[in-house]
Image (tube, helix red, strand yellow):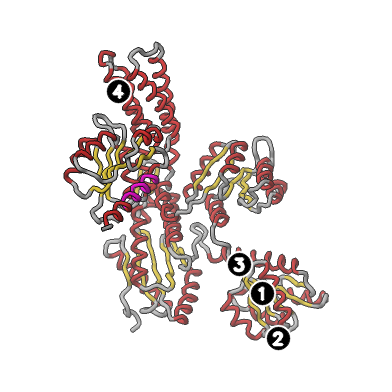
Amino acid sequence: MNLSASERFRRLKETFTQQLPQQLETIRSILGTRDEQGEGKAEALHRELHRLKGTAASFGLHRLARAADAGERLAKSLMEDKAISEDWEGRIKDCLAAVEKEIRELAVAAPECFSPMDLAMTEMLASSENQKTVYLCEDDPIQCSGMATQITCFGFRVKAFEDLETFRQAVFEHPPDAIVMDMIHHDRDTGGAEIIRQIRESQHSHIPVIFISIQADLKARLAAVRTGSSAYLVKPVNPLTLCSMLQDMTADTEPEPYRVMIVEDDPHLAELYSIILREAGMETRVLTDPMQALALLSEFTPDLILMDVYMPGCNGMELAGAIRQMDAYLSIPIIFLSKERDTNLQFDARRMGGDEFLIKPIQPGHLVSAVSVRAERMKLIRSFMVKDSMTGLYNHSAIREHLIVQMEHARRKGENLCFAMIDIDHFKKVNDTYGHPVGDQVLVAVSRLLKQRLRKSDVIGRYGGEEFAVILQDCSLEEASRLLEQLRESFAAICFKVGELTFSCSFSCGVASFASHDDLESLCMAADEALYAAKKSGRNRVFAAAADRCFL
Amino acid sequence: MAGNGVRVLVVDDDMFSAELAAMALEEGGLDVVVAEGGMDALEKVATDSGIAVVVSDMHMPFINGVQLLEALREHGFFQPFVLLTADDVTALRAKHPAIAAIVAKDGGFQETLFRVVADLLVTNRTKGEMP
């Protein structure tokens, strides 16, 4: 098993800290030997303390290194100077006491590393490189450490603060990637918001903040909003919600822009709307012929439709009705544009499925805010519909829909794609032995591993239970097999810890290629059969489906 | 770089320090041999012609780092020598200007060590290729 550098370092450091009490014991026993050995004793003492200093410094344990250094200097004075001062004995004992204190503190600090998923996560993170730092500010020490552990489990580096002043200083010295802040601090109901406002007013206005609070009332929420933060969670906080928020907020990639389809027969006006919305960072497509609307819908998949009420050939309301008849667009927001203030018409427009009615001429600011509010809601609704709540991956039906679209795409472009099904081996045993929460952690670990290691263009879903599905775009069967094989190895190497116990898991995988199975059912079935074959031949392996087996 | 027969000898009586140094070098793709002290190091150099750099701790019982360097040169070993120390680096550098590199043992020494050793290997190789 090939350990990552950070993991090797961590283990070595752990071993080093564990043997420290013994090393101190050795030093004390040298000190306790009788004086007749004279010079040998001083030299042995010096050597041991010097060694302790050097190794401690190498591990970055600077306080221990300093304590040992003081002892080393005393030992040196004993070596060089036969007539030592009377209080030498007392001073070296003080030094060793200081060393002991540091060692004790290290021993206390160590158990923090033993959260159930810690080991697994450190290994996975080694592959991602850009670990994000989160400052957690919570004045209840028990809640604080509980939450810190949870956030760490999801792959963040967490620094916890109980005290606001230390926190403020830390933000100025080393700004984090995100902050989780308790709203109530000591006696102040909105103490958390106050400190965030101060930080924002100085230079660090960009750091995203999530407020947590036992209060669900409007006053506290408003205080959060006034600091410019819309993220507010009521305790007890669901760790998955918190962490997915953190992930979104700290993601290096820009969020996907809103996609707006503009249907307007006047090309100049259409162009104007398009420019305004693009200026606001949205993606737009303009359609001047309403009869082409359905084709553009499936090609562009907009988050929102902006359309004129009156157009030749087909009016906006009829078009809205037609769009709403399609399942996939049942809930797409539609904004109507009209020159008239006719309230009856507005009423009709709403009845036909319009969400908003804007009167021309429209102020650019109004247009942007009307569009972004509704597009955001659409994105959210869509994500609820297609994402698995625990892993944040696409659910069964969403992954099948993606597969249909991707297969079509591959056909058009003349590319290949591969579809893989992954099933955790003996998952039931994990649940039965360690309980469902641990089983859930294993599922989350798989989903994180897939997300971190696969390409952005790959589609990852939870197919159900302990089964996952992956669509690998523009990829040969050989490449896909190799990639999945690497993932299989990585996953099998992850060590899960539950209290004192450790265990590891494996998965089996079946992968099939579009080149050999070019319709949805046969592709899915081929992947499923390959998975079954992988299970049958002993699990913990990746099988590729043979070409042209089905439907010939 | 791995597998081309070039090895780095790490000499340290402290197992943890030795392992840390070895880790840093192996991480960069170098092959590492560890010796527990000066005598062991002399023996390894004599029997292994692939050793291209020696990284030694200064403070060791019986033979310290500087004494080891002297012994190595006496035995006709002229590859680069890097000294690791927990003591003040500037004083040592002033005292032993002939040593190729002296690296302080601190929290970041692993990175420094790898860079220094890699540099020495590269310069040594280009020197060797020159007519």
Q: Is residue A506 left or right of residue A403?
A: left
Q: Does the CB distance between marks 2 and 3 fall below 8 Å?
A: no
Which residue is disc 3 drawn over? A257
Read off the chain for label 2: A
Q: Is residue A46 above or below residue A280?
A: above
Residue type (three-letter) at the residue carrying disc 4: Glu
Q: Is residue A11 magenta?
A: no
Mark 3 Cα shell of 10 Å, populated few (<14), some (14-19), many (≥20): some
Mark 1 Cα shell of 10 Å, populated few (<14), some (14-19), many (≥20): many
Q: Position of residue A216 (x, y in %)?
A: 67, 47
Q: Does the CB distance between marks 1 and 2 fall below 8 Å?
A: no
Residue type (three-letter) at the residue carrying disc 1: Ile
Mark 4 Cα shell of 10 Å, populated few (<14), some (14-19), many (≥20): some
Residue A409 in view here: yes
Considering only order in the chain, which callout, 1 or 3, is on the residue closer to the N terminus? 3
Dot label at residue A43: 4
Range covered by the magenta-colored residues: B111-121
Which residue is disc 1 drawn over? A305
Regarding mark 2 in the picture, which secondary structure is present there? loop
Q: Nearer the viewer, mark 3 or mark 1?
A: 3
Marks 1 and 4: same chain? yes
Marks 3 and 4: same chain? yes
